[in-house]
Amino acid sequence: MKSTLIIIRGNSGSGKTTTAKRLQQHYGRGTLLVSQDVVRRDMLKVQDRDGNLSLDLIRQIAEYGKGKCEVVIVEGILTQQRYGDMLKQLISFYNGNAHTYYYDLSFQETVRRHNGRGKNTEFGEDSLRDWWTPGDYLGVTGEVQLTDKMTQDEIAELIIKRI
């Protein structure tokens, strides 16, 4: 089985998880979704610091999907500085059959999107500002920038068409 890797990255509150879940629903059974928040916060309960255990586990889960799942989706903030090497290794592991997307939104749009979701009571604008890393591109060939002007529907459609 040929597997396709989809990487969705961006700042907190931008819409990554929403998009990833929509894609998983579209592609159906056997689509592997690897969420940074689930692995780091729920499974391992570790801080997002250099060398944290989630890097290896995200990579291992995504590698497990190759040859077993038609589509493997890895999503999260996944900053280039901390996760870039691991993500580039995954792209190589998938023999380049990978599609990379980065939510390149303004801070104001990120806050607006964050305020419209369920997690907006867990943390607010001050936390978003502390975590904010604009223009955090992975710098790989074909990386697609998702902008303020695109709706969640348009983003999902774009990714599905490209796959």
Image (tube, rainbow, N blue to C red):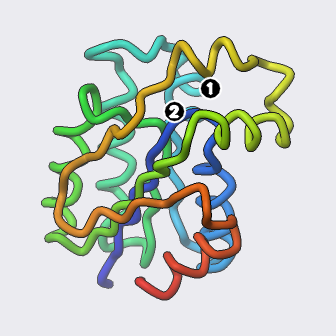
Mark 1 residue crowding within 10 angstroms, few (<14) / some (14–19) / many (20+)? few
Give the alpha-carbon distance from disc 1 to disc 2, as whole Å: 6 Å
Q: Residue at x 49, y 51 (%)?
A: 103
Q: In the image, is residue 106 above or below residue 33?
A: above
Q: Residue at x 71, y 33 (%)?
A: 111
Q: Which mark is residue 92?
A: none
Q: Residue at x 34, y 61 (%)?
A: 100
Q: Amino acid at mark 1?
A: Asp
Quadrant of the drawing holding the N terminus: bottom left
Q: Residue at x 36, y 53 (%)?
A: 62
Q: Is residue 66 or residue 147 the one in the foreground?
A: 147
Query: Could you say whether the residue bearing mark 1 is in a helix, strand or loop?
Result: helix
Q: Is residue 154 or residue 97 the one in the foreground?
A: 154
**Residue 150: % across, % down:** 61, 66
User: What is the number of callouts on the image?
Assistant: 2
Q: In the image, is residue 9 above or below residue 96?
A: above
Q: Which mark is residue 42?
A: 1
Classify residue 8 by image quadrant: bottom left
Mark 2 residue crowding within 10 angstroms, few (<14) / some (14–19) / many (20+)? some
In the picture, measured across the screen, residue 163 lies left or right of residue 109, that is left
Q: Amino acid at mark 2?
A: Val
Q: Are marks 1 and 2 in contact (CB under 8 Å)?
A: yes
**Residue 98: % across, % down:** 28, 69
**Residue 65: % across, % down:** 38, 62
Q: Which mark is residue 39?
A: 2
Classify residue 27 by image quadrant: bottom right
Residue farthest to the bottom, as pictured: 161
In the picture, measured across the screen, residue 77 lies left or right of residue 49, that is right
